Amino acid sequence: MIHPNIIHRRHAGSRLLAFALAFAGLLLAAGAAPANARQHKELLNRFVQSGNDSALRAFTQGRSFVDARQWEQAAATFDRFVAQYPKDPNIEAALYWLAYAHNRQGNPAAAEAPLARLLQGFPKSRWADDAKALRAEVFGKLGRPVPAADEADANDELRIIALKTLCENDRVGCSARVGEVLRSNQSARVKEAAIILLGRYGGTEAVPSLVQMSRTEANEKLRMRAISALGSTNDERALDVLREIAMGAAFADESPADSAIHALASHDNARAVAVLGEIATRGQNVKARTHAIELLSRRRGENVVDELLRLYDAIPDVAVKKYVVAGLGNRKDARALNKLIEIARTAPDAQLRRQAIHAIPNRGDEQDLDVLLSLYDAERENDLKNHLLGAIGRYQNQRAYQKLMQIVRNPAEPLERRKSAINYLSRSKDPGVMKFLEDMLK
């Protein structure tokens, strides 16, 4: 079963292409903010996974606080996560966000311990580069020297900053400067950053070079950087090249096909939506198809809802169709909610109904609880009713509490469901809930 939060995913590989890999520490060294808006979003959208629903809910809640820049709540949530789920797959990300929240909250000293734990316990983590960059900022605020290991690439950082400055101030000459770097004996890190800069500042003149590198570059890392850079050009000529790469049979995390799908997802041209839809329906690799749906659902624009509705009807494979249903949970559009309600009530496949039930709370609209309450009362199938209870339990408001208390009190409800309802209530500190629990002891 696809987890309700499946759409919030992705890994480091192509997500890091836009500064988090090459520039995170460099921008700090240049005096920029800890994370610009685009980098902040890229980090938030990294793949999260867990076999523990409680852990994943806690992680998602903490990340929501980060996204809302509610630093105190984020720090508290991730602090509890780290204490309660030390073996969870998301522990590395949780340590990073705990430190990040402490630092943004104005408490850099508190950020030091989780960063040390992350870098010492998980030195090869995909979060290590970002943690080092954050540590540099934290140490700077604390007036402490940056560890020597972090200074090893200082010359590369300076070269990248110099190249970035030159490209910003001379966009016409950026392509030529990057070409010189790529032909030189500079480090792979500098060359990767140069390709990123070419996509960002090279303009229309950079597109032919990036297309050629995307198709023929022997070094796979440099090729993936070129593919990602094509996405940031927002040039329509990039779309067919990215489609060609993404439609290939081979797909893996941190691969050219993966990078192409990410590039399409970030491409501003409206036709990128249709290309992602084509990959979702006709791609040779199932993982590439589902990944295209995931990223499509995160794009802005009403045409995304149009495409998701089309895909739901066009895709016969239930396993892939579930990703479309999950994607509808990312959309605020009323049409998305109406489709989810329709699927939850009438879809012939129980898997699709379950996925729609899980997707509705992901929309983040308190009014959607009314839909779930109505579905719960009308549903007669026990398994679906249990899933509806779980969806209701994700809301923290009086209407949800009242329904949960009603279920606990109802002897006609199965005992396991009543126990689940009281477990959801136990997560609340609401005075009314506390009194209800106290009264149960009398």
Image (cartoon, helix red, strand yellow):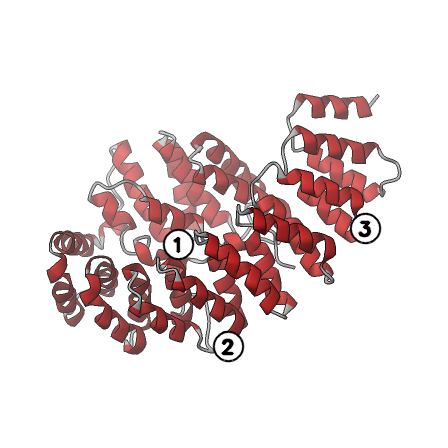
Q: Earlier in the sequence, mark 3 or mark 1?
A: 1
Residue 130 percent coordinates (x, y): 35, 49
- Where residue 68 sits in the image (x, y, percent)? 44, 37
- Most foreground residue, 432 or 72: 432
Real-space Cα separation, disc 3 to disc 1, in angstroms = 46 Å
On residue 284, the disc is 2
Q: Give me the residue at 83% from left, 32% from top.
A: 409
Q: How many marks?
A: 3
Numbered label attached to residue 123: 1
Residue type pointed to by label 1: Pro
Circle 1: element type: loop
In which quadrant will I find the N terminus? bottom right
Image-quadrant location for residue 314: bottom right
**Looking at the image, is mark 3 or mark 2 earlier in the sequence?**
2
Q: Where residue 56 appears, x then y in whole percent?
A: 58, 47
Which residue does the image show at 17% across and 54% down from the upper left?
164
Chain-order first, disc 1 or disc 2: 1
Secondary element type, mark 2: loop
**Residue 338, position as x, y percentages in the image:** 63, 49
Q: Badge 2: how crowded within 10 Å, few (<14), some, or many (20+)? A: some
Please, what is the three-letter code of the amino acid marked with disc 3?
Asn
The residue to which callout 3 is attached is 382
- Quadrant the C terminus occupies: top right
Give the residue at the far right of this rendering.
412
- Residue 145's disc is none
Q: Is residue 148 left or right of residue 308?
A: left
Q: CA distance from mark 1 to mark 2?
A: 35 Å
Task: Tell me where residue 221 sits by quadrant.
Answer: bottom left
Nearest the viewer among 249 and 155 is 249
Return the residue nearer the eye: 149 or 263: 263
Residues packed near mark 1 inside 10 Å, few (<14), some (14 to 19) or many (20 plus): few
Label 3 CA crowd tier, 10 Å (few <14, some 14–19, many 20+): few
